Image (tube, grey):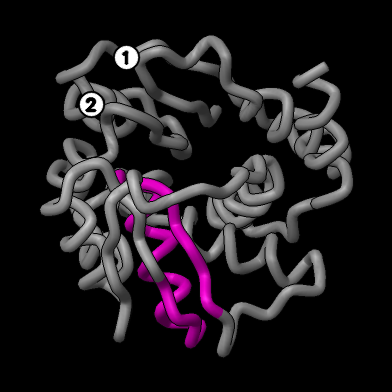
Amino acid sequence: MVGVIGDPVTHSRSPAIHNAAFVALGLDWVYVAFPVAAGRGRDAVAAVRTLGIAGLSVTMPHKSDVAETCDELTPSAAALGSVNTVVNRDGHVVGDSTDGPGLIAALRGHGVDPAGRRVLVLGAGGAARAIVDALGRADATVTVAARRADAGARAAALAPGAAAIDFTELDIAVDDGLSMLVHQAALAFTLWTGEPAPLDVMADAARAEGR
């Protein structure tokens, strides 16, 4: 069993995405949504150990709390102080962050290499910070637009040469993040199962869930 924790979480497309992938590969796995109230993320990590749950996806508002509770963090999760994927390795709980790599994979899947490009990131929360970090590692030039100057500056510091601006300086249209959702889910799927993720199946499930 794996699942997603958040508050709220009933709207999540992740169960549809992962369960479709398990069926496609014939894996005896199930993915469920666990509503976990704000401030109880640490309890959810303890439940992973106690119940032998294979892993969790972590969404708002638990990413920072979970990062503080895991036994081990990957370098990217440690740098961000944020976890969106928990992997249970025989009771040793590892926290990872697949948001940033998920975005990079999504861009490249659409034929867009971020290297050498100027990229605007809207927001400075957990997912945005992961994206800034990954874009910096992919040699993009990043500008972060945030409501709070201090949060924008902290996010921009994660990527070499990045700048921070206020939302009032923007006049652009925003694309949706469905492709990133699928690619970060695919990375988590492989971390849990050791199997290559069926991207097409997961993308179809995500689109169908949104109709």
112, above or below 12, in the image: below
Residue at 43% over, 82% down: 137
The CA span between labels 1 and 2 is: 7 Å
- Report the front residue among 11 and 75: 11
- Report the front residue among 97 and 113: 113
Name which of mark 1 and mark 2 comes first in the sequence: 1
Residue 41, numbered circle = 2
Residue 92, numbered circle = none
Which image quadrant is residue 206 in? top right
Query: Where the C terminus falls, by quadrant?
Result: top right
- Horizontal side of 184 relative to 201 (left or right) equals left
Residue 83 in view of the camera: no
Helix, strand or loop at label 2? It is helix
Which residue corresponds to mark 1?
36
Q: Amino acid at mark 2?
A: Gly
* Residue 88 counted in the magenta span: no
First to last magenta residue range: 118-142
Helix, strand or loop at label 1? It is loop
